[in-house]
Each structure stands twice: as structure tokens, then as C-alpha cells.
Amino acid sequence: MKLVKMYSVLFLIAGAIIALDQWTKALVRENIPLGGSWLPAGWEALMPYARIVHWYNTGAAFGMFQGYSWVFTILAFVVAGLIIYYYPQVAGMDWWLRLALGMQLAGALGNLIDRLMLEGKVTDFISVGTFPVFNVADASISVGVAVLLLGTWIKEWGAEEKTEAGSESAPGTHGEETPVETGEPARE
């Protein structure tokens, strides 16, 4: 039963992000012609800096490694399998790691769905400045990695603080000097 509860959290996080990813991609495919862009009325001043575009990607996140869709399809299956396998081994108090894994699973599966349904292509639509066009799944992977790194850093920092605090006041010393044995009789 504990395992079911654990996995339900993972699949709830991943499922919500996948649903948002697929919904936004479908909206873009249905409403913006390939290569076209869109901004809400009155926001035209943002056009050079941020806009919604309709673009396809056959590579990795943010348009890297174009033309290797089959590699990323296989990689997505491997990553998803590893996350699902590893997830129950994560300590319950490591909520940040659970969140990060859920976000990375969502990103991998969100783009995998596109690759399987769109003949190796992934719909990208968020364009900000000169940054490569991306989607919700790409953002989920990136934010998941950031959460993982930040959580690991905070955990290590906390452990280091505890270690330092423990070594500063060893039991029984309380700042007193401890006599050192020299092998000579004590003088009074």
C-alpha cells in the first residue's frame, strides 16, 4: 500500500504537467499555422522579446541535436524507466527529489508523446528573446534539474552545518580544557 501511495504522488505530479503540456501544444497546433506567431491584443510591444510560435523540433530540448529524434525517443523510454524504478528508493523526507523526478518524468513523457504521435517531431511554442523555442515539457525538465540541484545543495549544506555544530561542542567539554597526560606525576 505504501508503494501505491508513493507512486500516486509521482504520477499525480507527472500527469498534471503532461496534461498541461499536451493541452498547450494542441492549442498551438490548432490555432497557429506552422511558422506563425501570436500575442494577445495590446501586447504587440512584447513581440521582439516574447511570443507564442508554432515550431517543430526533431532534436533535444531547446532545439539541440536536430535530426536525432529516434535517439531521444529511446532515451525518453530509458529515462522514464529509470525514474519509475528509482523513485521508491527516495526517502520520504526528500520531497524536493520526489518533485524533481516527477517533473523530469513529465518532461520526458510529454515530448515522447509528441515524437510517437507526430512522426518524430515535438511541438515547441514558447519564444523568449533569442533563447531557443521550447515547450512546457522542456521547461519541466529544466526546472526539475534546478530543483534537484538546489535541493541537493540545501541538504548537503544542512548536513555540513549539523556536522560543524556537533564538532564544536563535543559532549563533556563545554569549552573546558581537558588535561593532557604527559606521563609525569601531577603537581599540586
Image (cartoon, rainbow, N blue to C red):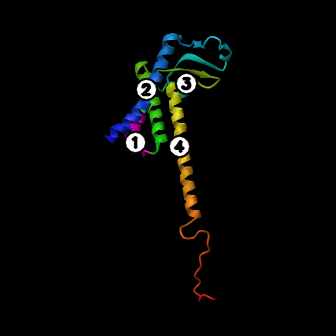
Marks 3 and 4 close (CB-CB < 8 Å): no
Tell which circle, 1 or 2, labels the residue nearer the N-terminal end: 1
Q: Please, what is the three-letter code of the amino acid marked with disc 1?
A: Tyr
Task: Please provide percent x and percent y for residue 185.
Answer: 59, 89
Residue at the left extreme of this rendering: 1
Query: Dividing the picture into quarters, in which one does residue 79 lie?
Result: top left
Tell which circle, 1 or 3, labels the residue nearer the N-terminal end: 1
Magenta region: 77-92
Which mark is drawn over residue 151?
4
Q: Is residue 161 left or right of residue 137?
A: right
Marks 1 and 2 close (CB-CB < 8 Å): no
Q: Secondary structure at mark 4?
A: helix
Tell which circle, 2 or 3, labels the residue nearer the N-terminal end: 2
Name the residue at 59% across, 79% down.
180
Q: Please, what is the three-letter code of the amino acid marked with disc 2?
A: Leu
Tell which circle, 3 or 4, labels the residue nearer the N-terminal end: 3
Residue annotated with mark 3: 134
Q: CA distance from mark 1 to mark 3?
A: 27 Å
Q: Please, what is the three-letter code of the amino acid marked with disc 4?
A: Gly
Q: Please, what is the three-letter code of the amino acid marked with disc 3?
A: Phe
Quarter of the image with the C terminus in it: bottom right
Residue annotated with mark 1: 86
Task: Please provide percent x and percent y for residue 53.
Answer: 57, 16
The question of residue 57 being in magenta is answered with no
Q: CA distance from mark 4 to mark 1?
A: 17 Å
Which mark is drawn over residue 112?
2
Name the residue at 62% across, 74% down.
177
The answer to whether residue 77 is visible is no
Q: Nearer the viewer, mark 4 or mark 1?
A: 4
Name the residue at 41% across, 35% down.
10
